[in-house]
Amino acid sequence: MKKIISVCRGDGVGPEVVNEGVKILEIISDYTEFDFEFKEAPAGGEVWKKFGNNLPEQSFETIRNSDALLFGALGLPDLPLGVAESAIMKIRQGLDLYVNLRPIKLYDILREKCPLKDEFIGSGIDITFVRENTEGLYKNIGSIDEDSAQNLMLYTRKGCERIIKYAFEFAKKKGHSKVTSVDKANLLKPSQLWRKIFHEIGENYPKIQKEDIYVDAYCQWLIRAPYKFQTVVTGNMFGDIISDEGAFLIGSLGMASSGNINPRNVSMYEPIHGSAPDIAGKGIANPIGTILSVKLMLQESFNSLEIGNEVDKAVEEALKEGRTVDIKSEKLKTLSTEEMGDLIAEQLKNRLKK
């Protein structure tokens, strides 16, 4: 089963963590029916310095003609804001990647790394944020001058319907009993449209409980009772904020994965952390967010739930033996980025051999 995967290594720690994601895909190629071919698709700050363009047309063509994109992180401190990072928006908009899937799972072995008291963790944290990915403020319709700046928060019926339907179908597939919608309908007109459509579509899923929460209230409930949430659907900006907050609860931002998805198009998979140029080249970045993004790729783009689950189990087993510095344990060996990737790859190899 041959699949072409375009690879954008990006800036800062991006190349370091992407190397470990590729390593996992190579193990899967060696021990399963998958045959992955990798094609480079450079983008970001370093590319902009060389070519004056953060996403060359050749890179975008490579991405568009692949089966999936493995993406690192973009951004350099010596460039103006957005010069590197806007390449991500070009890919999301250009491929209409309207779903941003962000799972937040606290492994039992990392429970002590959660900043919350045990009583607030409860039965555990396993939330999937389904974030609208192409509309809202991040569509970046606006202007700026010396005295003022504005952005239009644009929600369309089409955009709301398709992401909310995706969230309900995702919850149904996962066996979740509740979908939580996060908005600001007490103040914002776009959120009022969102809430109306959420309940219209929710009527088609009578077995799934529906819940509305204002975004400011949700931010504190995510701290007070994260165990109460399963599938959470929300708009672009709210989703960016609450999923980053959630990532902090699972031990480290470096543990969090994401998929930028269009079910009918090539999709992009990336860790949610930034390029972290201050630690680039030191070999201390956590590659698990990237490796779990590979898990999402397998499950969402290649319909391989079983192999994706094997990647997840390999990560969990590796965490019992060693950790990167952001989640270090006095009882276990502290590993470099590459060593962490090697350990997970070895665990996965052993599992796939069985």
Image: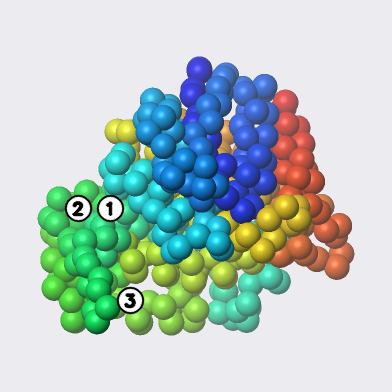
User: Which residue is at 21% across, 65% downward?
Assistant: 142
**Image coordinates for residue 145, horizontal then vertical, percent:** 25, 74
User: Which residue is at 30% across, 56% downward?
Assistant: 132
Disc 2 secondary structure class: helix
Q: Is residue 120 left or right of residue 260?
A: right
Distance between mark 1 and mark 3 Cα atoms:
19 Å
Q: Which residue is mark 3?
A: 215
Numbered circle sitting on residue 53: none
Disc 1 secondary structure class: loop
123 lies above or below 115: above
Q: Compare marks 2 and 3 and give the one earlier in the sequence.
A: 2
Q: Compare marks 1 and 2 and give the one earlier in the sequence.
A: 1
Distance between mark 2 and mark 3 Cα atoms:
19 Å
Q: Nearer the viewer, residue 177 or 14?
A: 14
249 lies above or below 296: below
Q: Compare marks 1 and 3 and give the one earlier in the sequence.
A: 1
Quick check: marks 1 and 2 in contact, CB under 8 Å? yes
Q: Residues within 10 Å of mark 2 (few under 14, many from 20)?
A: some
Q: Which residue is mark 2?
A: 159
Give the image quarter of residue 309: top right
**Image coordinates for residue 247, horizontal then vertical, percent:** 54, 65
Q: Is residue 18 visible?
A: yes
Numbered circle sitting on residue 134: 1
**Image coordinates for residue 227, horizontal then vertical, percent:** 49, 70
Q: Is residue 262 left or right of residue 158?
A: right
Q: Residues within 10 Å of mark 1 (few under 14, many from 20)?
A: many
Give the image quarter of residue 78: bottom right
The amino acid type found where label 2 is placed reads Gly
**Image coordinates for residue 211, horizontal then vertical, percent:** 28, 69
Disc 3 secondary structure class: helix
The amino acid type found where label 1 is placed reads Thr
